[in-house]
Amino acid sequence: MLKGKKNSMPEEREIRIQRLNALREQGIDPYPNSVERTHTIENVLTHFDEYAGPEGDFAIVGRVRLLREMGKAAFAKIEDGTGALQVYFRINDLGEESYRVLKLLDLGDFIEARGFLFVTRTGERTLHVKGWRVIGKGLQPLPEKYHGLEDKELRQRKRYLDLIANGEEVKTVFETRSRVISAMRRFLEGQGYLEFETPILQPLYGGATARPFITHHNTLDRDLYLRIAIELYLKRLIVGGFERVYEIGRNFRNEGIDRSHNPEFTMMECYQAYADYNDMMKLVEEMIAYIAQEVKGTTRVTYQGTEIDLTPPWPRIPLLEAIHKYTGIDINALPDRESLAAEMHAKGYIVDPKLGRGRLIDDLKGEMLRKGIPELQQAIFLIDYPLDVSPLTKRHRTHSGLVERFQPFIGGLETGNSFTELNDPLDQRARFEDQMKQKSQGDEEAQVLDEDFLEALEIGMPPTGGVGIGVDRLAMFMADQESIRDVILFPTMRKTAEEQMVED
């Protein structure tokens, strides 16, 4: 419930409904179809000195946030999406009937007010109202203006209240997110990439190691999956002859929720023919530096108290070397799962018995990054990953057992994933078959064999570089937010107590 409102909300709602009915009894439509608005509040304030004077005629609209009546005069503060302005009502200007309707106003109602601009004796810029009307009646009370909405979970669950109560703080976060996506599109299109839309409902899921959500199509009488990655369909477009393609879209993974994971999230994936992972590293560092400059006005961005320089080039750090340096485990000296698991046990790390050697290395990477090592908090690329955890990646041209893969990290956040894409259809089939074997042994996130994609590869795919960037995590960084749920307008939430009671 809202702070301080738990017991009063039902009673207040009833009072507001009574006022709503009173408006209708007086022939006033509290929800008119259209309104008249000549200026935004921002426009009025920007040009106030020019516009002020009794000859002016300005119609503004907005939500009532403060209301103070003083006998035959009243003051209110209204807000639209651009700012806030005081308005002044006087019975001598409005007449008794119109002025009396003010008593049916509640905080949170929307009004249209027309009049001229002046400055009060206390220096407040104000609209002197000559005529007004209700244009939207609120039936629930707003969160308290000065205490805000303090419950973190309620803020995430009811984002509309969060936006009202915490105003500029929250709006700035989501404006930042929007600008990040716009800047990303501008950069990619400036590099010659074309944006396409690919299926979200897919007959097979693939392109990542994750558990899918399953649904059923009644007419086709077949199960379908919400996509876990955009990858395999964009690669089909490379096969078809497009050379630079991208998509910004939703992915869905049936996985846990924490500060950097939400089951529904946004990815940008792009693929470039005749490129490799070195080309994609250059693309990523230049793109993120460009986004920072566009959104923040600088490539030096502070995240959670640490200043991070995004200026290219970023350090390229081999993954296995970093794990050896920061965990003391030399992966190269541990050629099989058993020896790696024993060493991890000896060093105090938890070992999941269902995971193969490659996935255990991935777990070690996560443990290493959670140590808060300053070097790993900067903008870096971890490069050259194990073959058995990268089933869609081309083998490394010089290092046996590794693939040409990198991941960008910013502020310790894994921000993306990139490969020199595997375009050998026979090798790809063997990798898929190995993944299916791991799946049969209990790895629920292993990839499935996609015959249609293999057929596309057999038609022929040119050498290709690909990259995926987590838009939510990039927004976390640019908006300096600690949790992914604070940059997703409507994150996935657990059931409320009321919802659980209904089901029970």
Image (cartoon, rainbow, N blue to C red):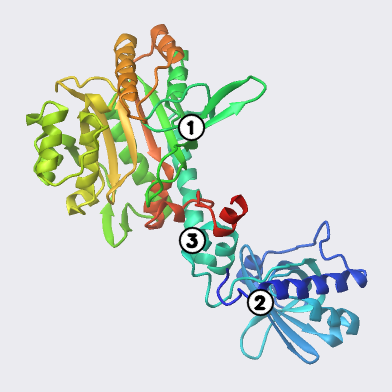
List the single residue furthest toward the front.
504
Query: In the rendering, at what x and y percent does residue 264 appear?
Result: 48, 42
Query: In the rendering, at what x and y percent does residue 259 appear?
Result: 37, 52
Report the side of 52 relative to 440 (left or right).
Answer: right
Q: State how many labels appear.
A: 3
Q: Earlier in the sequence, mark 3 or mark 2?
A: 2
Image height of 453 relative to 317, above or below: above
Say which amino acid is labelled 2.
Answer: Ser
For the point 59% across and 51% down, the residue is: 504
The N terminus is located in which quarter? Answer: bottom right
Mark yes or no: residue 246 visible. Answer: yes
The circle on residue 247 is 1
**C-alpha separation, residue under disc 2 versus residue under disc 1:** 48 Å
Read off the residue under disc 2.
Answer: 8
Q: Are marks 3 and 2 in contact (CB under 8 Å)?
A: no
Res 231 → quadrant: top left
Task: Tell me the SS state at disc 3.
Answer: helix
List the single residue furthest toward the top.
459
Discs 3/1, front:
3
Q: Decide which of 469, 340 is in the foreground and name it.
A: 340
Report the side of 332 relative to 89 (left or right).
Answer: left
Say which amino acid is labelled 3.
Answer: Glu
Say which amino acid is labelled 1.
Answer: Glu
Discs 2/1, front:
2
Read off the residue under disc 3.
Answer: 153
The circle on residue 51 is none
Report the side of 504 relative to 482 (left or right).
Answer: right
Query: In the rendering, at what x and y percent does residue 173 appear?
Result: 47, 57
Task: Tell me the SS state at disc 2.
Answer: loop
Q: Earlier in the sequence, mark 2 or mark 1?
A: 2
**C-alpha separation, residue under disc 3 versus residue under disc 2:** 21 Å
Image height of 80 relative to 145, above or below: above
